[in-house]
Image (cartoon, rainbow, N blue to C red):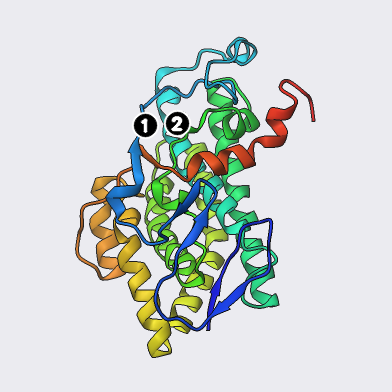
């Protein structure tokens, strides 16, 4: 059986006996669920970490007044923290879309908990960066325009098929473990300490991903679907890491190097996610919640 996820307006999962990959309707419109890695990303301009108005993408005057000067080294390091923070936030949001429609009740609870954990890690990273940049975690998470997010294309993808969601989960946790190890060696003590704390909590995410990978590989059909999804998402997974770390990911996953879908580009699926994620905050600009 194949579980497919519908949009939030119709939350009940449907089953399909077809073994071929279907198509899904994305928030941005109808298109094929499986597309080549290069065909769904667009380049976005690199920008500073300045806060922007959520609806127009222009710099907010009130946010600019709150910003304070930080030492150049701290500002550079804080800027780098935004990439993993954005990854965790957007992936947590994507994983949360399975709440209420996972294949069975226990998994509904487990995957929702993992989504919550990723968003919690994002908040901790945002707070670390915000302290150096003279802003707040909420402003970094929700007041930037979509093109200012540093997240990798892998986490933006809306994957309505369970095997593809698990393939991303498995690849992301493998790559994230390598990234966390690198962050634990950071000369910025606060970042190294936070990375160590996150690493202890991510152990359970990795165990869950490995459990599902083993479960899907246990049957011929499940293995075929899972491996096809891993093949599809492999270039995206490579793009999650900086180039020096990609060789370790190839060794861990057991796949050869490929042309990565680099960070620095966004899929068409980020903006609809951002619009929903920031909808309440944008409805009352400047409000204190």
Q: Is residue 217 visible?
A: no
Mark 1 lies on residue? 44
Q: Is residue 289 above or below residue 243?
A: above
Separation of marks 1 and 2 at Cα, in angstroms: 6 Å
Q: Secondary structure at mark 2?
A: helix
Locate residue 172, reporting x and y percent.
43, 59
Q: Are marks 1 and 2 in contact (CB under 8 Å)?
A: yes
Locate residue 143, reporting x and y percent.
60, 28
Instruction: Give the residue drawn at x 64%, y 74%.
Output: 107
Marked residue nearer the N-terminal end (1 or 2):
1
Quadrant where the C terminus is found in the figure: top right
Which mark identifies residue 147? 2
Q: How many marks?
A: 2
Instruction: Give the residue drawn at x 65%, y 55%.
Output: 116
Locate residue 11, reporting x and y percent.
68, 63
Residue closest to the eye, 228 or 198: 228
Left or right: 261 with respect to 116?
Answer: left
Q: Crowdedness of circle 2 by 10 Å Cα count: few (<14), some, many (20+)?
A: some
Q: Which residue in the rendered view is the most extreme toward the right?
A: 289
Q: Which residue in the rendered view is the most extreme toward the front?
A: 30
Quadrant of the rendered image containing residue 213: bottom left
Q: Is residue 272 above or below residue 176?
A: above
Q: Secondary structure at mark 1?
A: loop
Q: Is residue 260 visible?
A: yes
Quadrant of the rendered image containing residue 83: top left
Locate residue 45, reporting x and y percent.
36, 27
Left or right: 110 with respect to 250?
Answer: right
């Amino acid at each position: 059986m194949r579980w497919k996820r519908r949009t939030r307006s119709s939350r009940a999962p449907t089953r399909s006996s077809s073994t071929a990959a279907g198509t899904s309707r994305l928030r941005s419109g109808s298109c094929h669920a499986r597309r080549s890695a290069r065909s769904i990303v667009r380049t976005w301009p690199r920008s500073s970490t300045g806060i922007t108005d959520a609806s127009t993408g222009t710099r907010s005057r009130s946010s600019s007044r709150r910003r304070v000067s930080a030492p150049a080294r701290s500002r550079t390091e804080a800027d780098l923290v935004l990439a993993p923070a954005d990854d965790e936030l957007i992936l947590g949001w994507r994983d949360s879309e399975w709440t209420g429609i996972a294949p069975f009740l226990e998994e509904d609870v487990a995957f929702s908990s993992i989504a919550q954990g990723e968003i919690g890690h994002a908040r901790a990273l945002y707070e670390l960066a915000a302290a150096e940049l003279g802003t707040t975690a909420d402003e970094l998470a929700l007041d930037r325009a979509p093109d200012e997010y540093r997240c990798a294309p892998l986490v933006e993808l809306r994957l309505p098929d369970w095997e593809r969601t698990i393939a991303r989960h498995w690849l992301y946790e493998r790559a994230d473990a390598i990234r966390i190890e690198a962050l634990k060696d950071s000369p910025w003590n606060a970042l190294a300490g936070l990375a160590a704390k996150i690493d202890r909590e991510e152990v359970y995410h990795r165990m869950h991903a490995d459990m599902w990978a083993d479960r899907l590989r246990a049957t011929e059909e499940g293995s075929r679907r899972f491996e096809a999804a891993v093949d599809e998402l492999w270039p995206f997974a490579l793009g999650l890491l900086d180039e020096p770390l990609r060789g370790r990911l190839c060794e861990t996953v057991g796949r050869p190097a490929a042309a990565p879908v680099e960070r620095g580009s966004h899929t068409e699926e980020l903006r609809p996610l951002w619009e929903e994620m920031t909808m309440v905050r944008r409805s009352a600009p400047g409000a204190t919640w």
